[in-house]
Amino acid sequence: MLPGVCVLIGLGMAMIFVRTKGHFKTKTQALAAIAARYGLFVAVLLSLFIGNALTLNVLNGAQPPDPARIESKVLPETKVDIYERVGRWLNANTPPTATIGVTELGVMSYYAGRKTVDFLGLSSPQHIADIRHGDFLAALLREQPDYVALSAVNAIYNVDPQKEDWFKTLYKPVMQFEDGRFWGSPMTVWQRTRNRLATPITLNKQTHELSDGWHVLAIESSAREAKGGEPLRLRVQLRAGKPIGNRTLRVQAEWVGVGDGLPVVSRLIATDRWREGEVGWVDVVTVPRAKPTEGTYVISVRWLEGGNDVRAGYIKVQPTQHIVIPPNTQFVPLSDGVEVLRFGSFGASAICNNAMFDVPVLWRGGQTSTDYVAFVHLRDASNTTVVQSDAAPKNNGLQYPTSVWSAGELVADAHTLQLAALSQPLAAGKYSLVVGLFNSQDNTRLAVVPSAFRSADGGVVVGEVEIKDGCNS
């Protein structure tokens, strides 16, 4: 550009000379005329000199501007070479069926000759929506390609997964390319060393308000069981409300006990980029420490800046099993693979009719996505329920929803029956104990497989207890 400007200046000087010829009255004007006469010639020489100097400067390895300056980001010639090297390496060192993740499809994809995921390209409606929302990690989490090529600067636009624990757990660096002319140098090729995170399953699909018209519509997880050191993908479906500027969405799996949880993960949400009423997903990944606390975890979602704390959906860290099943015991089957232990006679002695006593219920887990409530009924000879307990199942005293039960897992539940709260004391005699599970949303019971121990109303008769009167208050 600069040599061309010199030529234009020279042409301008010559034009001035032509227009003013014959009107010089002083030596100064005469010198100006000479300069104008020969200006074009001088400009051409100057342009040739500057152009050759710039060319020599480039050939001698001139460096692009500081990567922090915008000028360095508009020099395509500085990245073509390194992109070609990366692409050729991928072609020579990856299986033909491998998938590659890149931020610029052209050169690397051409030389790699592999199926390529373009993180910044508009490849699907979901991808377009993610980019409009400013979510540049969504495509990486959705696709989880076999190899990923990322630059050291602006790895995926304004985010860098290379600094995040989940990415370094899922991928390992296998090759690095450097080029001092390229503002993003070095470029690192990462290989996925673990299986893809599983397709998320729904933990909760009820509507909960965050604030300002923003709602959580669903919560998903790549697994119902979290394991130490293994990345866990959590997805939150949002429905947009009013634009409220940038907000930090905080997501954590919190232990149902006190003061513990899996590592907190957060995502910056540019709410102004969402259309009011629009529905979209936000993905986060947490990596549990090596030995997380055993038990149940509830997913907590909230704005860090304030609003409601939405707590919905459960996962677990598998508790250590300490239960020994006595020989010759009998489990009665319900639906979805769930079973309950029939214990026959309850206790070695009769229960006072003004007592409070605990009924142990031993479940053997199946696989159900519904969080059921357990019921325990004490029934008389006419099958009338005289006292009952309805409560979410627990395992050794801690909340343990049916949605996290595993097939064959033993769950030591217990329910308290309070006879003293009855308006009339129970008559002495034998009473049956009937248990089961029901959905609190519609009061439907989990069906019991027909057997001799199935009650007429769809419970399981697990045993009987003798009640006596005349006990001291």
Image (cartoon, rainbow, N blue to C red):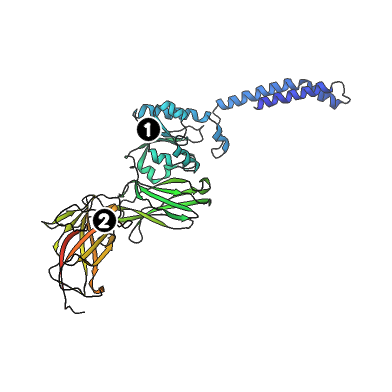
Residue corresponding to mark 2: 445
Q: Quadrant of the C terminus?
A: bottom left
- Foreground residue among 285 and 37: 285
Q: Circle 2: is it few (<14), some (14-19), or many (20+) Cα within 10 Å? A: some
Residue 100, image x and y in percent? 39, 33
Q: Is residue 24 above or below residue 126?
A: above
* Pointer 1 with pointer 2, Cβ within 8 A: no
Residue 76, image x and y in percent? 53, 30
Q: Quadrant of residue 395?
A: bottom left
Residue 128, image x and y in percent? 47, 38
In-image side of 458 versus 278 (left or right): left
Q: Residue type at mark 2?
A: Arg
Q: Earlier in the sequence, mark 1 or mark 2?
A: 1
- Residue 99 badge: 1
Q: Secondary structure at mark 2?
A: loop
- Foreground residue among 143 and 446: 446
As drawn, the residue found furthest toward the left would be: 328
Q: Quadrant of residue 97?
A: top left
